[in-house]
Amino acid sequence: MTADFQDWARSRQVRIETSLQTWLPAANVAPERLHDAMRYTVLGGGKRVRPLLAFASGELSKADDERVTIVAAAVELIHAYSLVHDDLPCMDDDVLRRGKPTCHVEYDEAIALLAGDSLQSLAFQLLAEHQLADTPQMQLEMIKRLAQAAGSRGMAGGQAVDLASVGKVLSLPELEFMHIHKTGALIRAAVMLGAWCGSSLNEDQLMSLDRFAKCIGLAFQVVDDVLDAEATTATLGKTAGKDAENNKPTYVSILGVSRARELAEELRREAYQSLEVFGAPAGRLRQVTDFIIHREF
């Protein structure tokens, strides 16, 4: 990473952390234990990749930073809720997330379930109570897009496919279908919501941006699968090797580590090609792309 990108990313990560601290209910407000669990889950961890993508696409569309901060926070709240629920014993049954005990371990299963529900609700509250777009119609489209990304035709649907695939051998297209929904839908939403906060992009440009987001959403998962196979628990901040232990189909189990790495690079090139229409102004998105592909944890 260049020093310029590191400074930019750090400033956006601090900005989103500060905003989330403000918008999450205080831990001393009733019901205290639920609010404490929400803050425990969201704050002080994670690379904030989805907010970084929202900020980068917002720069491309000349969006106001205040608007992008709100949509970035909403996407991150949806992401955090999904992690809480995915870690539950009825799902992936994991005990470590972002280097600390998962929410249901630190609190209990009921509080974890309610914390996830509450984070999802807060995300849509943020989108509804602030002006984020130039027209009400566009703001409604933004709310609709995030809802779709989180629901049965997006993240939740992808998780359902994931659970149903344990112990099965999937084809590459079947695996891609799963991750377009489970991982890719929310990443695509982050990119598009950030762009929709501005008004300088035409329909063809928005279509190119969505193609970029699809590529980078899949690439993120490919790299995640490689890291799960190769990195340590201490490095990842979550249980390493969990997918193999649970006999889950992954890009590594289907392709092997070497070919999975090649696929990530191919997706990076496709993502870059989708940004060619923008020229130099898409430089920040290219930097975030490289950060995603070449991250080590």
Image (cartoon, rainbow, N blue to C red):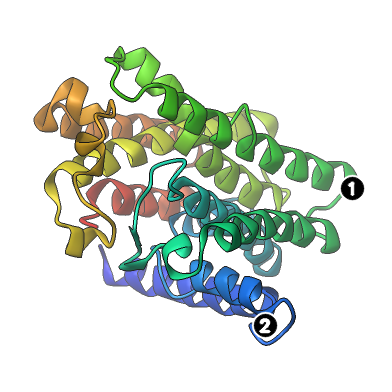
Relative to 177, is 286 above or below?
A: below
- The residue mark sitting in front, 1 or 2, is 2
Crowdedness near tag 2: few (<14), some (14–19) or many (≥20) residues, C-alpha within 10 Å: some
Q: Residue 156 vs residue 237: left or right?
A: right
Residue appearing at x 59%, y 63% in the figure: 111
Residue appearing at x 51%, y 28% in the figure: 160
In this view, the residue farthest toward the right is 136
Whether residue 211 appears in this view of the structure is: no
Q: What is the distance, in whole Å, between disc 1 and disc 2 at their CAs?
A: 30 Å
Q: Quadrant of residue 62?
A: bottom right
Classify the position of the N terminus by image quarter.
bottom left
Q: Which residue is mark 2?
A: 26
Q: Quadrant of residue 153?
A: top right
User: Tag 1, which secondary structure?
Assistant: helix
Q: Which residue is mark 1?
A: 136
Classify the position of the C terminus by image quarter.
bottom left
User: Tag 2, which secondary structure?
Assistant: loop
- Residue 192 position in % (x across, y down): 61, 43
Residue appearing at x 35%, y 29% in the figure: 270
Mark 2 belongs to which amino acid? Ala
Relative to 141, is 297 above or below?
A: below
Q: In front: 30, or 76?
A: 30
- Residue 67 position in % (x across, y down): 71, 63
- Numbered disc total: 2
Residue appearing at x 50%, y 55% in the figure: 84
Mark 1 belongs to which amino acid? Pro
Sequence-first disc among 1 and 2: 2
- Residue 195 position in % (x across, y down): 63, 48
Q: In front: 64, or 82?
A: 82
Whether residue 265 appears in this view of the structure is: yes
